[in-house]
Image: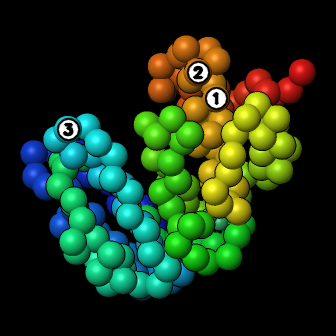
Amino acid sequence: MCGIVGYIGPRQAFPILIKGLHRLEYRGYDSAGVALLNEHCELNVYKSKGKVADLEAVVQDKDSTGTVGIAHTRWATHGEPNQINAHPHVSASGDIALIHNNGIIENYAVLKQSLQANGYVFKSSTDTEVLVQLIDYILRKDKSDLLTAVQLALDRWSVLMP
Ligand code: GLU
């Protein structure tokens, strides 16, 4: 059983996110990751196979500043447990980081094919990366806001179909 932690507020997000991930460890997981938005609005994503402590080691000498962040402990369903398949997954634009918990995107294969036909290149073997690239595609195509793009991605997967 995987887990998600999110934080937005006045404090530094990373220590809060890590504390939250440690509290979720009892549920079981195979990898962990975090996405942080720093004060320059740069998105930093760090991931690790193994324990939350392994993730902390990865981040130790990196920029872990920012008051907005999301974090995840993964239980793999699509793609082996490794660093590349760990969440968060980032959109082609580099603007969106996405975590997906306890779920399977049943039609991910057909969505992936359609996105590939539209020029998207996938880094991971997960179903989750398909969702973040679909949101990215809708944002570009419809020039919609993020909330609308997420709603469309979840409701109208056929947007990519001819
Ligand atoms: N389908 C997702 C994956 O394999 C599930 C991740 C999870 O629930 O932790 O990455």
Q: Secondary structure at mark 1?
A: helix
Q: Position of residue 17 (x, y in %)?
A: 27, 64
Determine the quadrant in which ligand 1 lies. Answer: bottom right
* Residue assigned mark 3: 40
Count the marks.
3
Ligand 1 within 8 Å, label 3 CB: no
The residue lying toward the viewer, choosing from 140 and 30, is 140
The residue lying toward the viewer, choosing from 43 and 87, is 43
* Residue assigned mark 1: 137
As drawn, 133 above or below 145:
below
Callout 2–callout 3 Cβ contact below 8 Å: no
* Residue occupying image coordinates x 48% and y 26%: 147
Callout 2–callout 1 Cβ contact below 8 Å: yes
Q: Position of residue 93 (x, y in %)?
A: 51, 35
Quadrant the N terminus occupies: bottom right
Residue 143 left/right relative to 130 = left
* Residue occupying image coordinates x 66% and y 36%: 134
For the residue marked with disc 2, what is the amino acid?
Arg
C-alpha span from label 2 to label 1: 5 Å
For the residue marked with disc 1, what is the amino acid?
Tyr
* Residue occupying image coordinates x 64% and y 29%: 137
Label 3 neighbourhood size at 10 Å, few (<14), some (14-19), many (20+)? few
* Residue assigned mark 2: 140
Q: Position of residue 156 (x, y in %)?
A: 73, 27
Q: Secondary structure at mark 3?
A: loop
Label 1 neighbourhood size at 10 Å, few (<14), some (14-19), many (20+)? many
Quadrant the C terminus occupies: top right
Task: Indicate which disc residue 97 carries.
Answer: none
Residue 113 left/right relative to 122 = right
For the question of whether residue 150 can be seen, the reply is yes
For the question of whether residue 29 can be seen, the reply is no
- Outermost residue toward the left in this view: 10
